């Protein structure tokens, strides 16, 4: 079974076998429960830092100790997904005039 990330509106109907109740029930067993309680900004930073795909930039975080972060904390970057909303507008500004 493969995952389809999006459907056209005319494909969302009861007759579509990909959207069947049986398939949904079976697939649910294969999804991992990767939700974790995060109680502090420091803990969130450590989890993000150890996450695969995270890029540690050379930009230091201003006053990290006040935020409960390590003294040498850097801005973290994670590039995944698509450009949407405000991010798309910001990239147009940063990338020059179009």
Image (cartoon, rainbow, N blue to C red):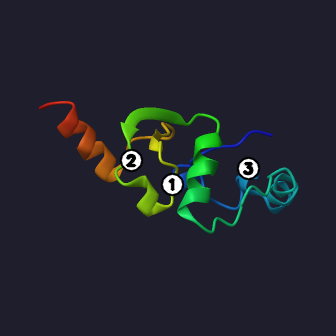
Ranked by sequence position, the earlier of labels 3 and 1 is 3
From this view, report whether residue 83 is shown above or below residue 27: above
Q: Tell how many labels.
A: 3
| Residue 69 circle label | 1
Is label 3 or label 1 in front?
1
CA–CA distance in space, label 1 to label 2: 9 Å
Secondary structure at numbered mark 1:
loop
Observer-nearest of 13 and 18: 18
Q: Where is residue 2 in the image (x, y as percent from the top left)?
A: 75, 39
Q: Where is residue 92 in the image (x, y as percent from the top left)?
A: 22, 37
Question: Would residue 10 be found to the left or right of residue 93 on screen?
Answer: right
Is label 3 or label 2 in front?
2
CA–CA distance in space, label 3 to label 2: 45 Å
Ranked by sequence position, the earlier of labels 1 and 2 is 2
From this view, report whether residue 59 is shown above or below residue 62: above
Labels 1 and 2 touching (C-beta < 8 A):
yes
Mark 1 surroundings: few (<14), some (14-19) or many (≥20) residues within 10 A: some
The residue under label 3 is 18
Secondary structure at numbered mark 2:
loop
Mark 2 surroundings: few (<14), some (14-19) or many (≥20) residues within 10 A: some
Question: Would residue 57 be found to the left or right of residue 26 on screen?
Answer: left
Residue located at (64% from left, 65% from top): 38
Observer-nearest of 10 and 94: 94
Q: Which residue lies furthest to the left in this view?
A: 97
The residue under label 2 is 61
Q: Position of residue 49 (x, y in %)?
A: 59, 42
Residue located at (48% from left, 36% from top): 79
Secondary structure at numbered mark 3:
helix
Q: Where is residue 46 in the image (x, y as percent from the top left)?
A: 61, 49
Ranked by sequence position, the earlier of labels 3 and 2 is 3
Quarter of the image that includes the N terminus: top right
């Amino acid at each position: 079974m493969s995952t389809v990330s999006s459907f056209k509106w005319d494909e969302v109907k009861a007759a579509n076998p990909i959207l069947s109740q049986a398939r949904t029930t079976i697939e649910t067993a294969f999804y991992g429960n990767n939700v974790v309680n995060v109680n502090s900004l420091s803990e969130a930073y450590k989890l993000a830092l150890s996450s695969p795909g995270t890029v540690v930039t050379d930009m230091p975080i201003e006053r990290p100790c006040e935020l409960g972060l390590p003294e040498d904390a850097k801005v973290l970057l994670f590039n995944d997904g698509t450009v949407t909303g405000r991010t798309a507008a910001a990239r147009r500004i940063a990338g020059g005039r179009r």
